[in-house]
Image: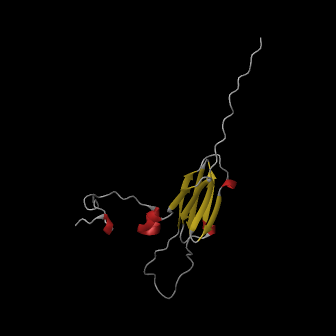
Amino acid sequence: MLLPSIFGESLLDDLMDFPRMEFPDVDRRLYGKHASQLMKTDVHELETGFEVDIDLPGFKKDEIGLALENGYLTVSAAKGLDEDEKDKQGKLIRQERYAGSMQRSFYVGEHLTEEDIKAKFEDGVLKLQIPKKEEPKAPEKRMIAIEG
């Protein structure tokens, strides 16, 4: 039975139930069926720049990295589990926590430097402030007068 989308089902789900070729996805294996919801990002444009909020739940500040190269700002996060911590009193029935990494890149322009971008991490949300900067203009072509 087809249900309207207000009940959490898409009208086309039953009609478009074609077999799909599944590719091994590290994030899916790492974070389960909710992998597509990780690193969700909100970008707000202001007069002076952009505010970017990236959800990184479960990560600590030292597990997050920011790099600026060739105009691309790359946000990466890596998480590891201690393999040495073993519970000797019982066997592991289900394990949903894994080690792994993820990253996402944003083009911010080649004219920005690391000092221009401000970052703050609190409550599982990475907040970035990226200013709007105009690219330096090419010098005007000036004609040289020829005497004679």
Residue positioned 50% across, 71% down in the render: 98
Residue sitting nearer the eye, 114 or 131: 131
- x, y percentage for residue 115? 69, 55
Compared to residue 84, the image places residue 130 above or below, namely: above
Extreme residue in the left direction: 1
Extreme residue in the top direction: 148
- x, y percentage for residue 141? 68, 28
| Quadrant into which the N terminus falls | bottom left
Q: Quadrant of residue 147?
A: top right
Residue positioned 57% across, 65% down in the render: 78
| Quadrant into which the C terminus falls | top right
Residue positioned 43% across, 61% down in the render: 25
Compared to residue 2, the image places residue 144 above or below, namely: above
Is residue 108 found left or right of 9 in the rendered image? right
- x, y percentage for residue 48? 62, 53
- Count numbered badges in the picture: 0
Residue sitting nearer the eye, 10 or 83: 10
- x, y percentage for residue 36? 44, 63
Extreme residue in the bottom direction: 89
